[in-house]
Image (cartoon, helix red, strand yellow):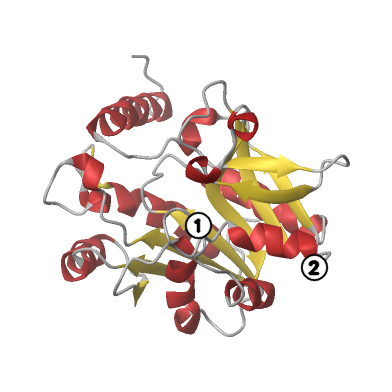
Amino acid sequence: MQTVIDNVAAVILAAGMGTRMKSSKAKVLHKIIGRPMVTYVAETARKVVGNNIVLVIGNQADKVKRVVSEETDVIFAIQEKQHGTGHAVLCAQLCIPEYTDQIVILCGDVPLITPYTIIQLIDDHINAMRDISILAVEIDKPKGYGRILLDENRNVTRIIEETDATEEQKAIKLINTGIYCVKKDYLFDSLKKIKSDNVQGELYLTDIIGIGYKEGKNVGVLVGRDIEEFIGVNNREDLKKIEIIMHKRLYKAQGKTT
């Protein structure tokens, strides 16, 4: 696998409020082993796409911009009001280099994702000639996550959020990690078609999946193997869990045992 892919850009979503952290600090600035969590995501993205990184910020935008700029060089896009993940990606559109063909979408609060897994997703997406590829994982307790719905031929039909899911859909163990690879042109074409007719009244990025399926686009899924990579930070307990895993990674990289 190659390590830097020139025609791919990364959009990192980092504009959210993070109210469950019960802190005045922006969620993505909470530290893991002394570093803001979002900088781990940016560093990982850089190893894959080089300088083609757009960080979407909103909550405490000036502070996030200042802190992140001290560690890494990214392009900042502002989401003035949080109207959902679909709206956040739209805010990044004008910042993406023209020569980009594919967009990888990452989450600023999922700091354990590795370059290897992102490259796997991109390679799988391009080799299968897909319009949209979702990075998914199977877990025994999927509560709180968006479920991936498949048709009888195992084609991805849509992603349903927990708040909008039926009891039968909530039993599905294949969940969305919030990480995607999408053809740039199709991404922004489909984002213009999504609507906020859901419980949260937001523009869900996940709705591009259902739109793509209905339009006959090639929509597929790559199932990740390491569940730990996709742990997101929603509260302080998650933060502690991730820090333990990060320490283990460092020990392993140094040839030590815990």
Task: Locate the C terminus by quadrant.
Answer: top left
Which residue sits at x=16%, y=65%? 63
Total numbered circles: 2
Tell me which corner region of the image, top left, top right, bottom left or bottom right, holds residue 144.
Answer: top left
Residue 22 spot, x, y in % from top left = 16, 41
Which residue sits at x=27%, y=36%? 235
Residue 121 spot, x, y in % from top left = 66, 50
Residue at the disc numbered 2: 215
Residue 95 spot, x, y in % from top left = 45, 81
Which residue sits at x=57%, y=26%? 139
Residue at the disc numbered 1: 198
Q: Residues within 10 Å of mark 1 (few under 14, many from 20)?
A: few
Question: Which one is in front, 76 or 164?
Answer: 164
Question: Which one is in front, 36 or 116?
Answer: 36
Residue 32 spot, x, y in % from top left = 25, 39
Whichever of labels 1 and 2 marks the residue nearer the N terminus, that label is 1
Helix, strand or loop under label 2: loop
Helix, strand or loop under label 1: loop
Compared with 8, 33 (above or below) is: above
